[in-house]
Amino acid sequence: MLRALALTGGLLGAAVVSQFPEFTQQYTQRLGGQVEALETVLADFDASAQKAEMTREEALASMGGSVFLENRRRDMRDTIERHARLSDDLAVLQEASPLERLTMPHRVTDTALARATYEEFRPALPLSVEGAISALVGYLGGWLAVSALLALLAWPFKRRKSKSGLTF
């Protein structure tokens, strides 16, 4: 019974983790779209600053005097920071092989983008090397997690042997 549960945990882990390569591929595609959209916003802002004969920083500094402009300045700074962060993640993910991406869940940092990717995600049959490795890692992780949990739950009920060899 316990082995069957551990096997089930392993198979569930394999099924879930084997989808990571496909998820990161879909996430990377969406990430590229987000970076392009942010580049458009920043190019428009920079063009407006240039028309006023200002740098980006000078334009941001000049945005003040009202609650709206202060909020807009904060929003633009957030947009600039998000663009930099997402551009960095995109460059790393695009340069990485599918196998290397297995070690990069920390590059799936934009929670809104990850959520949107997940909502539209369609599982793929893991017929690639990275899919097989992901399935193996997931299987081992699931098997170990369920085995450890079952061992922990069963621990108080195990019979203890005394020094004389008798069980209580």
Image (cartoon, rainbow, N blue to C red):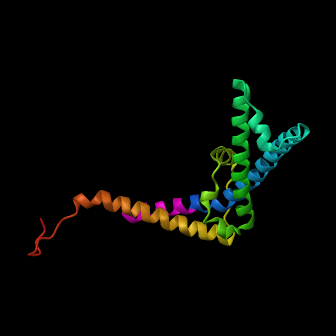
Residue 109 falls inside the magenta stretch: no
Seen as rendered, the residue at the extreme left is 164
- Picture coordinates of residue 9, whole percent (x, y): 47, 60
Q: Which quarter of the rendered picture does the C terminus lie within?
A: bottom left
Considering depth in this image, is 164 or 114 the residue closer to the camera?
114
Residue drawn at x 77%, y 50% is 35
Q: Is residue 31 left or right of residue 51?
A: left
- Picture coordinates of residue 128, whole percent (x, y): 69, 70
- Picture coordinates of residue 112, whole percent (x, y): 65, 43
Q: Is residue 77 above or below residue 68?
A: below
Residue 142 in view in this figure: yes
Image quadrant where residue 14 sits: bottom right
Q: Which quarter of the rendered picture does the N terminus lie within?
A: bottom left
Q: Is residue 149 above or below residue 48?
A: below
Considering depth in this image, is 74 or 133 the residue closer to the camera?
74
Residue drawn at x 22%, y 59% is 157
Seen as rendered, the residue at the extreme right is 51
Q: Examine the residues drawn in magenta and state their main secondary structure.
A: helix
Residue drawn at x 74%, y 28% is 69
Residue drawn at x 84%, y 41% is 54
Q: Is residue 18 left or right of residue 3?
A: right
Write down the region rendered in magenta.
1-14
